[in-house]
């Protein structure tokens, strides 16, 4: 069993579709956002359950969610785990996932902050599937929120 896969997540269960890779025998899972089969890792498990929760429980339109979005920062290509877009196609949220075995610390927030230097979104979320942090980016810094807003409340969190 893949380490981190067996831990119960602090997210509603998602119906996931699996298959084995014919070449390597590795387990693959279908990502409905990217519309393709991807390796089933602990981080991918968190991403798929989290995105499912956003779509099914927070009314995020699946067509406004992108997984593995490339950004260029200081000449380096990086990938945001998930980006949420508004109705005009502008990014409004970056989400960074970690395996349930990874503690969320300052390094994770530094990572997502570097992505946001490029993207300039008003919302940042970090999750390891067990603990979720949501921040509203403001002029003075980030304000941690008690809950993750529904899609409709992204513009008006209070």
Image (cartoon, grey):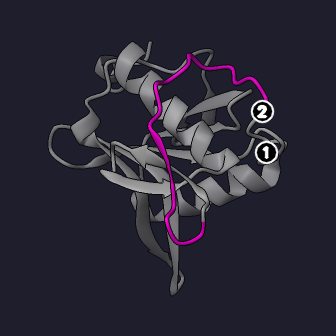
- Image coordinates of residue 69 in percent, x first then y, are 40, 61
- Pick the quarter of the image with the C terminus: top left
- Image coordinates of residue 89 in percent, x first then y, are 19, 48
Q: How far apart are marks 2 and 1 (CA)?
A: 8 Å
Tags 2 and 1 in contact by the CB under 8 Å rule? yes
Q: Can residue 9 be spotted in the picture?
A: yes
Circle 1 Cα neighbour tier, 10 Å, few/some/many (<14 / 14–19 / ≥20): few
Query: Which residue bears the numbered disc 1?
Result: 1
Quadrant in which residue 130 is drawn: top right
Q: Is residue 7 above or below residue 59?
A: below
In this view, the mark in front (2 or 1): 1
Query: Which residue bears the numbered disc 2?
Result: 6
Nearer the observer, 13 or 74: 13
- Image coordinates of residue 46 in percent, x first then y, are 61, 38
Magenta-colored span: 7-24
Marks 2 and 1, the one that precedes in the sequence: 1
**Residue at coordinates 65% horizontally, 47% vertically from top-left?**
43
Q: Is residue 79 above or below residue 28?
A: below
- Pick the quarter of the image with the N terminus: top right
Circle 2 Cα neighbour tier, 10 Å, few/some/many (<14 / 14–19 / ≥20): few
- Taking the magenta stretch, the answer to whether it contains residue 32 is no
What SS does tag 1 mark? loop
Residue furthest to the left in view is 88
């Amino acid at each position: 069993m893949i380490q981190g896969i067996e831990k119960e997540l602090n997210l509603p269960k998602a119906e996931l579709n699996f298959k084995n890779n014919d070449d390597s025998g590795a387990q693959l899972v279908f990502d409905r956002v990217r519309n393709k089969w991807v390796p089933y890792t602990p981080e991918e498990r968190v991403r798929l359950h989290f995105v499912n929760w956003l779509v099914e429980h927070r009314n995020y339109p699946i067509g406004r969610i992108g997984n593995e979005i490339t950004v260029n920062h200081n000449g380096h290509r990086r990938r945001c785990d998930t980006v949420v877009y508004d109705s005009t196609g502008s990014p409004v949220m970056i989400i960074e996932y970690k395996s349930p075995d990874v503690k969320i610390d300052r390094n994770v927030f530094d990572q997502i902050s570097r992505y946001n230097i490029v993207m300039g979104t008003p919302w940042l979320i970090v999750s390891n599937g067990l603990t979720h942090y949501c921040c509203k980016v403001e002029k003075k810094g980030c304000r941690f929120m008690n809950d993750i807003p529904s899609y409709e409340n992204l513009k008006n969190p209070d």
